[in-house]
Amino acid sequence: MSSDAPASQPSGRDRREYYRITVTLPIRIQLETDTAERALVEQSVNLSGGGFGVTISVLYRPADLLAITFLLPDHGLFTSFAEVLRLDPVPYHEGTYRLHARFVRMPSQDREVLIKHILQFQRDHLHTHYSA
């Protein structure tokens, strides 16, 4: 298998095996078919090597394919595709939803870059909050 070939799709169990961290990142989320150049918006993202969760005000449907772009420190723009797993309404914030999505068609080397950054976010957090 070529190193550029997409990795197999992670199962639900595999997605939970990836370390998860909540970080604030500039992010752009749009339907895969939407080719408009939209701005990145900084927001809190629960991120792992298998997918992400974020609060949004756009109503996507399960199985919609999204184009996702993150601005990762010391890397620049990181773009991938994700499948909408579900949207949960956010209580007391009408028109706001919690998006749960898993990465799809992500090459192994891109997943490694993402995991490397997640681990760096964790190191930075631990250093900031727990070092003397």
Image (cartoon, helix red, strand yellow):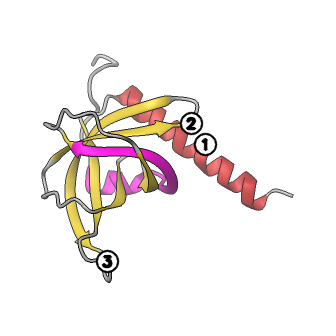
Look at the image and say whether residue 92 sits in the magenta stretch: no
For disc 2, the marked residue is 73
Q: Are marks 1 and 2 in contact (CB under 8 Å)?
A: yes
- Residue at 41%, 33% (x, y): give it: 78
Viewer-nearest of labels 1 and 3?
3
- Residue at 49%, 29% (x, y): give it: 76
Whether residue 10 is visible to the viewer of this picture, yes or no, is no
Give above or below for 39 relative to 130: above
Q: Quadrant of the C terminus?
A: bottom right
Q: Is tag 1's residue or tag 3's residue first in the polypeptide sequence? A: 3
For disc 3, the marked residue is 93
In the image, the segment drawn in magenta is 10-30
Whether residue 68 is visible to the viewer of this picture, yes or no, is yes
Question: Where residue 101 sits in the image (x, y, percent)?
Answer: 27, 53
Please identify the quarter of the rendering in which residue 1 is found. Answer: top left
Question: Where residue 109 sits in the image (x, y, percent)?
Answer: 40, 26
Quick one: which residue is furthest to the right in this view? 132
Give above or below for 2 relative to 31: above
- Residue at 40%, 35% (x, y): give it: 111
Give above or below for 23 relative to 67: below
For disc 1, the marked residue is 120
- The disc labelled 2 sits on which kind of residue? Pro
Viewer-nearest of labels 1 and 2?
2
- Spatial CA distance of label 2 from label 3 is 31 Å
Q: Secondary structure at mark 2?
A: loop
Q: Is tag 1's residue or tag 2's residue first in the polypeptide sequence? A: 2
Question: Where residue 73 sits in the image (x, y, percent)?
Answer: 56, 36
